[in-house]
Image (cartoon, grey):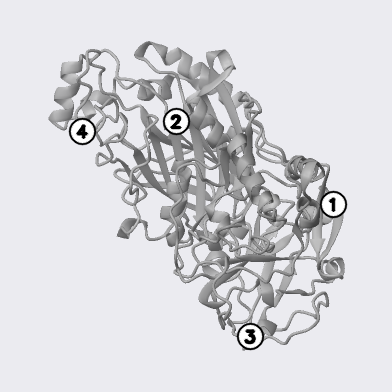
Amino acid sequence: SPVTTSRPGRAPPCPAPPRCPRPCPASSSPAGGRAWPPDITVVTWNVGTAMPPNDVTSLLHLNTGETNDVDMIAIGLQEVNSKINKRLKDALFTDQWSELFMDVLSPFHFILVSTVRMQGVILLVFAKYYHLPFLQDIQTDCTRTGLGGYWGNKGGVSVRLSIFGHMVCFLNCHLPAHLEKAEQRKEDFATILHMQQFEGRVANGILDHDLVFWFGDLNFRIESLDICFVKYAIDSNVLSQLWEKDQLNIAKSTWPVLRGFQEGPLNFPPTFKFDVGTNKYDSSAKKRKPAWTDRILWKIKSPSTGLGAGRHRHSQGMLSVSQLCYCSHMEYTVSDHKPVAAIFAVQFASKVDKPPVEIYVADEWSRPEQAVVRYKMAVGFHRSSWDWIGLYRVGFRHPKDYVSYVWARSDDGERCLEKQLCAQVMFSEEALPKGNGEYILGYYSNTSSSIAGVTEPFQISLPRSEEGSSPTDSSGSSSEEDDSTLVLLAPKSRSPSPGKMKRHRSRSPSLAKFQGLILRPSSRDRGTSRSPSPQSRRGLPRDIPTIHVPQEELGCCGAKGKELRQAADSLEGSSFYQTVQEQGRPQHVSSDSPLARADPRNLGLLPALRLEMIDKALGWRRENVDQGYYPCRRMSPTSPPGCGTSPKEG
């Protein structure tokens, strides 16, 4: 049914019942007291500084009947390449492993909820898009234990969050290697548990959470047994003869710090150490003994009871965990470790009945005037003037991967919150994608740095512009990016200003500032799209303010013109002020003005960037100055990609 249009800012009462409600799917908002059994997949892989493989579908158990209902996926990586050149790039941009997992999971409606990295140790947490409003209080932390706590090649990274009101923590660790370092592994794990503290009134420590998943390259080895017997047991498939000599199995019964941690049976061959590119154990001169170094364990906060055969079930009160699968994947040979995956069915009574924000929208937008969004905020919701509503293509990758957005700033928002009325905003015609496609609306809360409400997919069918394609809607063409063009994620940012972004509390050394480098937009900012939807993005009309240096100042000749061009070059990189041309009149605005900050992409996600040597880039810039134009800088995702140039030239 069509939605009646009204002036943005006016908030009519919520319809009873609404004519066109499309709030969060019923499957994601269980009735109070009813058991909601989410399935969670946990993966750990020491990638040994290797490049990502072409496909990880089987590793994530996608397209298989056993995981059709998986709701969340946590992926822990160790030894991701962190040499100085890769550290510089990956400190600024998303690493290639994270890009791969987002590309593979987004078509299955998994969205990146949070990520944290400490040198070569990375943790990624994904969830189905319709669960996002029920994943709150997301925080990350990391603890380095290498070189006595000064280096992050060893240690642990964590993501904690509230899932339907229950506190859950994912902890990815890389502990010290070698057979004789068992005591050091215990001390490092105890240090990680002690050092990692979270903000809030509940679950300040890792073990304070209702449920903890502990996984990674824990580096526990097989004691006493000779390498020949170990290989014989593997070849004869009598792995149980090795279990009692496994250091982690021994430690679970003797170390107080491991009390309560559970693990399924090790019915797969040891995952270390293989010759790279093969399924053969170490044939080098060192002849290292195979071991189960890569493990996945879990712990329920209260003491657990009960142990079943086959499917291990441990329950206490209203929370229970069933391990459905625990296996390695021998088909991946890029590393000397094999990846390990586990699938859990977690059952508990939901403490949350409704999302923090409910969004109501028409079934289809076939005319611009139908782009009206009504939303209702729950009692106690902490709204912010920096909250916004994003329009996403079905298959988006993370909360900042939107097509367009509108600020959730209705004039009477506080009154709507107090009296439980529906607020209303409207997308402008210029912000709407052209053509046909399925889209989702999401309310992004700046206070919690997460999506507080989503809709089901709805249709947008708007006529295409006759002026040709532009960044928000292309004919489906795409261009491959080289490995130097990636996306920067800052999941902990709560400020609209990039200079005030809050990152996760890392104890890793910060990178030095490198001279002689500048940042320029990459091909992804020039109109290409990596959305699984066949429709790409089109551009917007070029009547929106853009950062621009007037050509009159650059077209001068002689010594005076040369001085002005040099001044323009220095001004272009200056953060003191920028020149804005609006409707043909240049105006000076401060870089920290609301116009310069009013872009939700600055709330933790910068556009893709490319590094270039400054001499080369300045030469390119001066050549273009001599030709009578100077490239524009984009102030917001709705700004035109260039001044008198094509999107690709911009």
Q: Can residue 382 be seen in this view?
A: no
- Judge depth for marks 4 and 3 and give the one in front: 3
Mark 1 lies on a secondary structure that is loop
Instruction: Give the left or right position of residue 9, taking residue 88 as reference.
Output: right
Please name the amino acid that badge 2 sits on: Asn
| Badge 4 density bin: few <14, some 14–19, many ≥20, Cα 10 Å | some
| Badge 2 density bin: few <14, some 14–19, many ≥20, Cα 10 Å | some
Marks 4 and 1, Cα distance to the nearest angstrom?
Answer: 58 Å
Marks 3 and 2, Cα distance to the nearest angstrom?
Answer: 49 Å
Marks 4 and 3, Cα distance to the nearest angstrom?
Answer: 58 Å
Marks 1 and 3, Cα distance to the nearest angstrom?
Answer: 34 Å
Residue 420 in the image, given as x and y percentages of width and height = 79, 71
Instruction: Give the left or right position of residue 231, taking residue 598 as reference.
Output: left
| Badge 1 density bin: few <14, some 14–19, many ≥20, Cα 10 Å | few
Mark 3 lies on a secondary structure that is loop
Marks 2 and 1, Cα distance to the nearest angstrom?
Answer: 39 Å
Q: Which mark is residue 81?
A: 2
Pick whichever, 638 or 39, lies toward us.
Answer: 638
Q: In which quarter of the image is residue 314?
A: top left
Name the residue located 34 percent from the left edge and 52 percent from the top edge. Answer: 57
Q: Mark 1 or mark 3: which comes first in sequence?
A: 3
Q: In which quarter of the image is residue 226?
A: top left
| Badge 3 density bin: few <14, some 14–19, many ≥20, Cα 10 Å | some
Q: Mark 2 or mark 1: which comes first in sequence?
A: 2
Please name the amino acid that badge 3 sits on: Arg
Q: Mark 3 or mark 2: which comes first in sequence?
A: 2
Determine which residue is flagged by label 1.
593
Mark 2 lies on a secondary structure that is loop
